[in-house]
Amino acid sequence: MSAIPFASSPRSSVGVEWELALVDQDSGDLRQVAPIVLDRISPDGSQHPNVRQELLLNTIEIVSNARQTVGQAGEDLRRNAELVQEILDPMRVEFMSAGTHPFARWDQQKVSDKDRYATLIDRTQWWGRQMLIYGVHVHVGIEDRDKVMPIARGMLPYFAHLQSLAASSPFWGGQDTGYASNRALLFQQLPTAGLGYQLETWSDLENYVADMLHTGVIDHFDEIRWDIRPSPRFGTLEMRICDGISNLGELLAVAALTHCLVEYLSEQLDRGRDLPTLPPWFAQENKWRSARYGMDAIIITNRAGDEELITDSLRSLLRDLEPVADRLGCAAELAGVHRIIEAGASYQRQRVVARESEGRLDAVVLSLVREFRAQTFG
């Protein structure tokens, strides 16, 4: 077994990664211009630390620095988006963020010229080529490596809350899939993706990684694509649960909920309490229910199999987390979750636009572009 060092990270520091689609201002279809954008941002060929290449040429990822509050992380994202937007405007290209593009064809998209992406496609073939998906990743700093796996397991009862709030991929290839988050089920088809394993200790993780490396399943740690995974080089727990989120205000609400949950669980460990978790079969069922039904999901809340409508569970959870949000300085952002409950999650809003425009999915793209520009929704 090889030791996996865990970087030093301030407790409950927070960082956000936001994958954004590049769409044509007129047609709403995807534009494969990411290389042009990246070249203009960094003409010397270096990589901009906060604007990154992704798997497909139609995608840019903007990244915050590690911050103390989600509000500060949001300011980083806003500045980085504005930097790229200045390049996009003359090209008549817009940012769009959702779990999937409503009508674009996956088989018409080109993969970035990078060895690790070529390796991924070579191995995963048809499923890998279908990864026309976009997500939001939230990193939260963990000050003690021994807390990482317990908190990862402790997040499972809240997995569906985050997935339902951010669900934004009802359409795929021009069709309504009937799912709130089609992305969630697409992405888990990749090797080492999905919910992952409920490991007890850091040593268990090291054993797992050693086995995966030995058998050639992965070549390096980052090829573990779990929905909730440790990030040893940053010293964080990374939540990769959420679909792409259309606007900054909504993103900060979901990030604040994530931030508060990790700190809440960390506090429980400090008090010597065991963290409630779910059996794997309940955790998997909750993931499916929230992907299928979104904000109408009835989720399993505990090991006894008790159930609750997710919006009722969210309201109760928000009350419990208010003191944590006050301490973390994100009370205003966390309150935005109430607005999502009231206005509807993105998948619900997209379906309203599609219905009111007689099924025109280019109108759905336009609505997502407008939400991104406005930095809010509804």
Image (cartoon, rainbow, N blue to C red):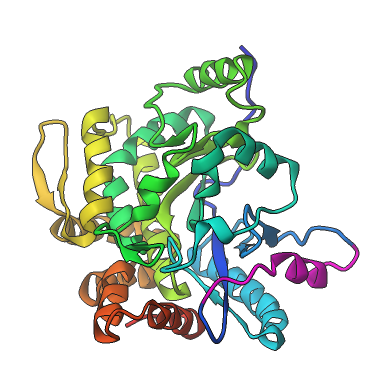
Residue at 77% x, 70% y: name it. Answer: 36
Instruction: Classify 71 as above or below 157.
Output: below
Residue farthest toward the top in the current orientation of the protein: 1
Look at the image and tell me in which quarter the C terminus lies: bottom left
Could one spot residue 143 in this view of the protein?
no
Note whether residue 316 is visible: yes
Q: Tell me the magenta residue range.
A: 29-44
Compared to residue 288, the image places residue 337 above or below, namely below
Q: What residue do we see at 16% from left, 31% from top?
A: 303
Query: Camera-side residue: 285 or 228?
Result: 285
Q: Report if residue 350 lies within the magenta region.
A: no
Residue 334: quadrant of the picture: bottom left
Q: Position of residue 193 (x, y in %)?
A: 46, 37
Q: What residue appears at the point 35 percent right and 33 percent down from the top-left corner?
A: 153
The image shows residue 305, relative to residue 245, as above or below, that is above
Give the mark count.
0
Compared across the picture, whether 46 is left or right of 29 comes to right
Report x, y in % for residue 75: 58, 73
Q: Quadrant of the N terminus?
A: top right
Residue that appears at 44% across and 77% down = 365
> Quadrant of residue 38 in the image?
bottom right
Where residue 253 sits: x, y (%)? 38, 67
- Is residue 99 rendered to the left or right of residue 81? left
Whole-percent x, y for residue 124 in the image: 55, 36
Residue 39 within the magenta-colored segment of the rendering: yes
The outermost residue toward the right is 44
- In the displayed structure, does residue 248 sit left or right of residue 309? right
Name the foreground residue: 95 vs 331.
Answer: 95
